[in-house]
Image (cartoon, helix red, strand yellow):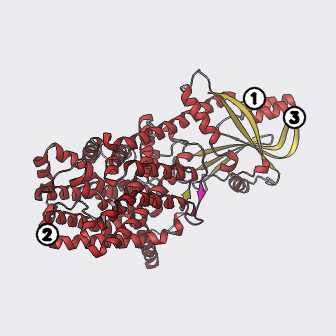
């Protein structure tokens, strides 16, 4: 048994090791986690006073909006996400899919659930899927609005460059998506330092203008926020949609927790990001107090000689923010595939050291086309800002609802305390959502349409796979019946090992039965292999596999993977064989796969158009041979027809 005192009082070397790791992780987290929220000063303050729903920049309005911004950062980001949501880790992983996987099955407590999201409550699981779909819309809009907002600084340098803003933005975005296949780790070391320069620069600009109008510090008094609503009524509420832009990127803190951990994210926020953001917003407010006509509030903070360098560094920061959202889309796709919400796709690992760094070609190019179309279609960051907030507010509301279930059923919080805490956060989130809903006609419809399409695709795939599994389960033969069939047919036992892969947890797969009936052949060793994705990011080696000897050379093997892991069947089987003393010659193994031919019917199941969509997705999915890393020369596929 380990020494308890050692656990209570770690050694100096252990503490120094943790410290030495904390600083590099914090530096990297600055670039990846805070790129989005860190570039909000480019457009957020401008939208409050010069956007589609804005108020005139009077002295009281400026202080009122600043007060709203400061307390939005404190309540939504500092308290809700940094202090509370980051506690809801799924074996260290974060993000809305990881949170959804934490939702217990109905009547269950905090213990291992079944294999997939199907065990959860349907409404809550649907919310989690829709929240995931919303993040794809965010992944399309964030690169467009951040890079476009940065390049628009050229308009401040000289109005003659205005016609070139959109073309330059498109070129930058195409370049960003084109380099994704090389992996973020190759430029990751540059992210942190660039963002540190960015935060110190925006803080310095803010301090410079605060010194010119110190009265702006009155915005720290929350009474200005209350008075703002009293003075402006409906328009004051509408401005909340622009104020919300300062907290977009809050979800990234939670989604990227698995890469960095809580401590680096919290340290970066409180030590650097929050102070620098507050100083810059106060500086922009001071600028408006002095010059109410300053319509490019961010870039007009800089002296004329520094405008071009500011455009360069702002563009670099915007690219980093875009990179974070694009990489996040790849990670979400990988989780969705593992959890049975999307068809198998090519997932390439871009780093031998960092497990989380992946590249999904189809998602990358789809995002690139969508982002470029969005930039050309909207034409300005101000127009795009109307489309930006609605997806993030809905995601935050869904996160709060799922977190409430986790708080009460997994953490065992007293119900009154959980209701009060979550009631405060939901009130804020719903107010932001209501304000952003006013902009649906002006562009807020875009992320909702994107999310609806992706939600439809995910639910169609999930439902379709369940139908196929149900149809195949009816054809599954029980183990006793299979042995009876063997005794009846007296098949020839040939040397070697045959591995039959199946999604059915019990019985004998149809492919094995058909091979026995039609070929009258059975290998010396037959393995029925069932692969399961559990509702945890990672599966321990101890729980990775289970082996049951069914007798007569027949084995049932169950492999488990977490939704952040990539299955490698030959490697796992080798480990299982060694652990259980099974002597397999892996040079004499044949893998048998059932290849379903799906038939669209008008019977039970889904609507015909959804069945057709499911068939198209199935045909374009990555082959099981590639996905499970099987040696192609040792794979035999046996066809089976399945009526939808």
Give the labeled residue for mark 2: 213
Question: Among all residues in the image, which is located at the extreme top?
Answer: 603
Q: Within 10 angstroms of label 2, few (less than 14), some, or many (20 or more) residues?
A: some
**SS for callout 3:** loop
Residue 530 percent coordinates (x, y): 66, 43
In reply to whether residue 583 is colored magenta, the answer given is no
Vertical arrangement, residue 22 with respect to residue 71, above or below:
below
Give the labeled residue for mark 1: 481
Of pointers 3 and 1, the one earlier in the residue sequence: 1
Q: Within 10 angstroms of label 3, few (less than 14), some, or many (20 or more) residues?
A: some
Residue placed most toward the observer, 552 or 448: 448
Residue 361 percent coordinates (x, y): 57, 53
* Residue occupying image coordinates x 34% and y 44%: 443
**Left/right of residue 39 with respect to residue 584 in the rendered view:** left
Mark pair 3, 2: CA separation: 92 Å
Residue 337 percent coordinates (x, y): 56, 46
* Residue occupying image coordinates x 60% and y 52%: 543
Residue 262 shows in the view = yes
For the residues carrying marks 3 and 2, which lies nearer the camera in this image? 2
Of pointers 2 and 1, the one earlier in the residue sequence: 2
**SS for callout 2:** loop
Question: Among all residues in the image, which is located at the extreme front?
Answer: 160
Give the labeled residue for mark 3: 491
Contact (Cβ within 8 Å) of mark 3 with mark 1: no
The quarter holding residue 604 reads top right
Magenta residues?
345-356
Report the quarter where the C terminus lies: top right
């Amino acid at each position: 048994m380990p020494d308890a005192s050692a656990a209570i009082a770690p050694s100096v070397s252990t503490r120094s090791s943790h410290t030495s790791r904390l600083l590099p992780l914090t530096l990297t987290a600055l670039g990846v986690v805070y790129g989005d929220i860190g570039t909000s000063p480019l457009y957020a303050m401008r939208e409050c006073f010069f956007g589609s729903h804005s108020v005139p920049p009077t002295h009281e309005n400026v202080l009122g909006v600043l007060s709203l911004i400061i307390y939005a950062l404190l309540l939504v980001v500092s308290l809700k996400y940094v202090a509370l949501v980051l506690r809801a880790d799924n074996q260290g992983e974060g993000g809305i899919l990881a949170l959804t996987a934490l939702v217990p099955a109905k009547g269950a407590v905090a213990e291992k659930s079944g294999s997939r999201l199907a065990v959860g409550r349907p409404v809550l699981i649907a919310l989690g899927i829709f929240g995931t779909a919303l993040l794809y819309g965010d992944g399309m809009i964030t690169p467009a609005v951040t890079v476009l907002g940065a390049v628009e600084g050229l308009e401040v340098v000289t109005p003659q460059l205005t016609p070139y803003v959109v073309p330059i933005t498109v070129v930058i975005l195409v370049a960003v998506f084109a380099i994704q296949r090389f992996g973020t780790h190759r430029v990751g070391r540059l992210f942190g330092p660039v963002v540190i320069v960015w935060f110190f620069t925006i803080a310095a600009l803010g301090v410079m203008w605060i010194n010119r109008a110190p009265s702006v510090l009155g915005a720290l008094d929350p009474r200005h926020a209350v008075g703002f609503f009293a003075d402006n009524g409906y328009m004051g509420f509408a401005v909340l949609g622009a104020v919300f832009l300062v907290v977009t990127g809050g979800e990234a803190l939670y989604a990227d927790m698995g890469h960095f951990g809580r401590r680096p994210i919290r340290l970066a926020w409180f030590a650097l990001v929050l102070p620098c953001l507050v100083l810059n917003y106060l500086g922009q407010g001071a600028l408006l107090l002095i010059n109410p006509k300053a319509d490019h509030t961010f870039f007009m903070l800089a002296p004329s000689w520094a405008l071009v360098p500011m455009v360069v560094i702002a563009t670099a920061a915007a690219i980093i923010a875009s990179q974070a959202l694009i990489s996040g889309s790849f990670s979400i796709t990988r989780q969705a595939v593992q959890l049975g919400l999307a068809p198998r796709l090519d997932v390439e690992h871009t780093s031998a050291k960092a497990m989380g760094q992946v590249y999904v070609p189809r998602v990358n190019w789809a995002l690139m086309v969508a982002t470029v179309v969005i930039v050309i279609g909207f034409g300005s960051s101000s127009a795009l800002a109307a489309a930006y907030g609605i997806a993030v507010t809905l995601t935050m509301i869904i996160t709060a609802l799922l977190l409430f279930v986790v708080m009460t059923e997994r953490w065992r919080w007293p119900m009154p305390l959980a209701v009060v805490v979550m009631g405060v956060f939901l009130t804020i989130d719903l107010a932001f959502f209501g304000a952003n809903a006013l902009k649906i006609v002006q562009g807020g419809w875009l992320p909702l349409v994107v999310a609806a399409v992706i939600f439809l695709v995910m639910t169609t795939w999930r439902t379709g796979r369940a139908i196929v599994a149900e149809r195949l389960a009816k054809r599954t033969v029980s183990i006793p019946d299979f042995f009876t069939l063997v005794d009846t047919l007296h098949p020839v036992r040939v040397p070697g090992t045959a591995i039959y892969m199946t999604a059915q947890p019990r019985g004998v797969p149809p492919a094995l039965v058909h091979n026995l009936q039609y070929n009258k052949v059975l290998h010396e060793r037959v393995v029925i292999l069932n692969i399961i994705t559990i509702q945890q990011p990672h599966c321990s080696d101890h729980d990775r596999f289970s082996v049951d000897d069914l007798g007569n050379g027949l084995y049932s093997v169950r492999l488990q993977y977490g939704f952040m892991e990539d299955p490698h069947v030959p490697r796992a089987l080798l480990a299982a064989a060694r652990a259980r003393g099974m002597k397999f010659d892996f040079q004499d193994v044949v893998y048998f796969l059932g290849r379903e031919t799906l038939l669209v019917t008008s019977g039970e199941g889904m609507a015909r158009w959804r069945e057709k969509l499911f068939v198209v997705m199935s045909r374009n999915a990555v082959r099981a041979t590639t996905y499970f890393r099987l040696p192609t020369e040792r794979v035999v596929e046996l066809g089976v027809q399945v009526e939808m």
